[in-house]
Amino acid sequence: MSERVAVVTGGSRGIGRAIAIRLAQEGARVIVTYVHGEKAAYEVIGKIKAEGGEAYAYQFDVSDYEATQKAFENIFDKFGRVDYLINNAGITKDNLIMRMKEQDWDRVIEINLKGAFNCIKAVVRPMLKQKFGRVVNISSVVAFMGNIGQANYVASKAGLIGLTKALAKELAPKGITVNAVAPGFIETDMTAGLSDKIKGYMLEMIPLKRFGKPEEVAETVAFLVSDAAAYITGQVIHVNGGMYV
Ligand code: NAP
């Protein structure tokens, strides 16, 4: 992967952090993006540099179209190219539909789904020109199973699957692959706040009888961007311990 440039949105924490570290270990120059977690983002780039890799942090909100285009302009000015785009940034704002506020619906869709669109728009022309690109969208097992109290989140993650399939067909002739990874229950800040009752219920649904680690998702992303996966596009790889089969 040497000389390849990777952008990992939401690379400051959790799954994105693990993806950034893993891609750097493969020799990619890694751009970690964040919105609020400056300290966490610099911790990640510090770790990558300490391991002999190359990493940079960029702050922007993926849901802000203009800010995202501007940030990528700066990235292209500095690096000249983006080879891998990992659309990982995401949030939850859970509630039963009866209680879900309109702004909570909008915010989750804006970040999780439109955020991916905003980033893809920023890289697609240069990727078409360079006739190479790998886009990996981080979806979720709930896009396939549904989940009570997550109508907004599930809709955003199912939307990412549709986006993945449409773009895979559209961009394949130009050497760009677009795939999705659908993690199950992964131990990160996003899941840390769930009650023991919910965690116990989730564990019962996982045949491998444990939660996943961010590194296990990162491994799949590293495969999808590698030359070994050159003939894979429009696919969803499930990393869920058998929770959904
Ligand atoms: P996390 O620990 O909560 O980290 C979320 C990351 O997204 C952070 O780096 C955060 O940046 C960034 N982010 C949030 N809003 C953003 C915005 N508006 N613009 C740019 N960046 C933003 O989450 P995670 O568990 O690692 O999840 C990563 C992805 O995997 C998400 O898309 C999530 O839906 C998906 N996923 C997670 C699980 C799971 O069990 N954990 C399962 C399936 C899918 P800051 O540090 O600046 O806040």
Image (tube, rainbow, N blue to C red):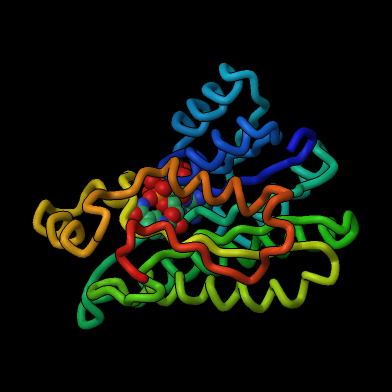
Pinpoint residue 3: horizontal percent, then vertical percent.
Answer: 79, 35
Of the pair 162 and 11, the residue shown nearer to us: 162
* Residue 91 shows up from this direction: no
User: Is 15 situated left or right of 242 in this image?
Assistant: right
Q: Is residue 212 above or below residue 172?
A: above
Of the pair 105 and 55, the residue shown nearer to us: 55
Pinpoint residue 64: horizontal percent, then vertical percent.
Answer: 59, 60
Name the residue at 14% across, 62% down: 201
Q: Is residue 44 above or below residue 234?
A: above
Pinpoint residue 113: horizontal percent, then vertical percent.
Answer: 52, 68
Pinpoint residue 78: horizontal percent, then vertical percent.
Answer: 80, 36
Quadrant where the image shows the C terminus: bottom left
Name the residue at 47% across, 64% down: 139
Of the pair 125 and 130, the residue shown nearer to us: 130
Q: Is residue 231 above or below residue 41?
A: below
Name the residue at 39% across, 75% down: 144
